[in-house]
Amino acid sequence: MEEEALQGFSNHAIGSRELDLGAVVDWNRDGVLDLAIPDAARSRLQVVSLAAGEAKVLASLPQDGGRHSARITTAVIVSDLDGDGMPELFYGLSDGSLVMMKP
């Protein structure tokens, strides 16, 4: 039984060998895992929470509500490279750019 739904996301591109366009991360550090996943056009990365049974977008990159000029084409990697206890998300675009997203 479906309780919540959001549309407009894609975790892969037809014909691509890359199947990891999404990642699991506790973005807002509330103890509930969230999903970082591209929009259907793969021009923005969005972090979606399902906490308390409610589907809600927590963050989007680019942060100004715009879109990347190239599509997201690589795996989304979660790491804390700077050691501050907050996750960073890294992913690549079709133009060769590397993007970092941080809460």
Image: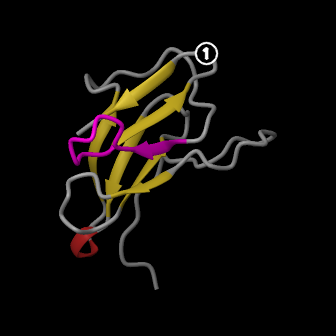
Percent position (x, y) of residue 77? 50, 43
The quarter of the image holding the C terminus is top left
Percent position (x, y) of residue 99? 44, 24
At numbered mark 1, what does the secondary structure look like: helix, strand or loop? loop
Tell me if mark 1 has few (under 14), some (14-19) or many (20+) residues whose alpha carbon lies within 10 angstroms of its own.
few
Residue at 48% x, 52% y: name it.
23
Q: Is residue 55 depicted above or below 46 in this figure?
A: below
Residue 46 lies left or right of residue 53; in this view the side is: right
Percent position (x, y) of residue 3? 37, 78
Residue at 44% x, 79% y: name it.
2
Q: Is residue 95 depicted above or below 55 in this figure?
A: above
Q: Quadrant of residue 64?
A: top left
Residue at 20% x, 58% y: name it.
29
**Label 1 amino acid?**
Gly
Most common SS among magenta residues: loop
The magenta-colored residue range is 76-87
Residue placed under numbered mark 1 in the picture: 96
Residue at 34% x, 54% y: name it.
48
Please tell me which residue lies in front, 68 or 85. 85
